Amino acid sequence: MMARNFDSRAGVTVLSLILLCLTISNNIVPVAEAIWLTIPNSGAKCVSEEIQNNVVVLADYYVLNEEHPEHHATVSVRVTSPYGNNLHHNENVTHGLFAFTTTEGGNYLACFTLDGHQEPATGVTLSLDWKTGIAAKDWDSVAKKEKIEGVELEVRKLKDHAEAIHNNLLYLKQREADMREVSEKTNGRVAWFSVMSLGVCIVVSVLQLWHLKRFFHKKKLI
């Protein structure tokens, strides 16, 4: 009887820890959610996300044209890395997807534009399901490949979530260190500029006094 109570308490404790870790990970690790974008007739609609290095990105997009089904609107899609490298480019499509693993940290940009001058005048709506990191992982395939299920699968998810949180914290720490270094360099340059400005002002003042003194001597005013 005591053994059963102990096992039940242990099970409740494990489940509580799982729920707690998942709650924390949802607050720290970005959760993928589909968003709707209104693509204007002119110009582009862009979305961006700051992603660290070596992260899997998976996105699915399709055009919603329920208000004007007679118009077959198509879009052009371009996804670029923080350094401007093209990761995905597609034209004249109503649906598509892209997937890649980041090779550099920074803002990844996805831009959508309507092809040509298309109706309706108010533009069209596009659904974008953007997933990164853990959210982009196919857990069904992992479970089948490694032959795990139930609590074991949840523990595996927790482990990956913990690794993602740890990597994200390390990334934020590195970003903070980089920003602090840039701030310190900027402060140093401002300090040197202030000293140089003060020196220039002093030199100019001395030259002005010397010039005025010579002028007054020539005019025999002093």
Image (cartoon, grey):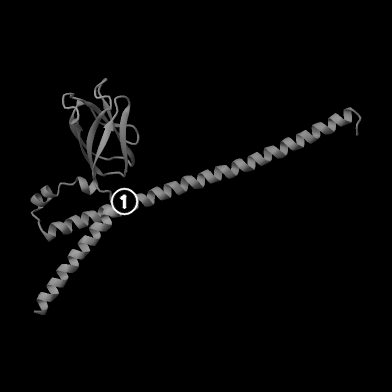
Closer to us: 20 or 100:
20
Residue that badge 1 annotates: 168
Q: Which residue is found at the position 8% from the left and 50% from the top?
A: 144
Q: How many marks?
A: 1
Image coords of residue 30 (percent x, y): 28, 48
Relative to 127, say whether 41 is above or below. Answer: above
Q: Nearer the viewer, residue 185 or 168?
A: 168
Where in the figure is residue 7, as x and y percent of width and height? Answer: 12, 72
Q: Position of residue 213 (x, y in %)?
A: 84, 33
Q: Residue furthest front?
A: 67
Quarter of the image for residue 10 reads bottom left
Question: Quarter of the image holding residue 84?
Answer: top left
**Which residue is most to the bottom?**
2
How would you rate the neighbour count of disc 1 (Cα within 10 Å): few for under 14, some for 14-19, many for 20 or more?
some
Q: Quadrant of the C terminus?
A: top right
Q: Residue at x 26, y 52 (%)?
A: 164
- Taking the image as shown, residue 142 lies to the left or right of residue 189, namely left
Q: Is residue 121 left or right of residue 175?
A: left
Q: Is residue 91 left or right of residue 46?
A: left
Quick check: 118 left or right of 218?
left
Looking at the image, which is closer to me, 34 or 212? 34
Secondary structure, mark 1, is: helix
Q: Quadrant of the N terminus?
A: bottom left
From the top left corner, tell me how far across and down residue 34 is, in percent.
22, 42
Residue drawn where x is 41% and y is 50% of the image:
176
Amino acid type at mark 1? Asn
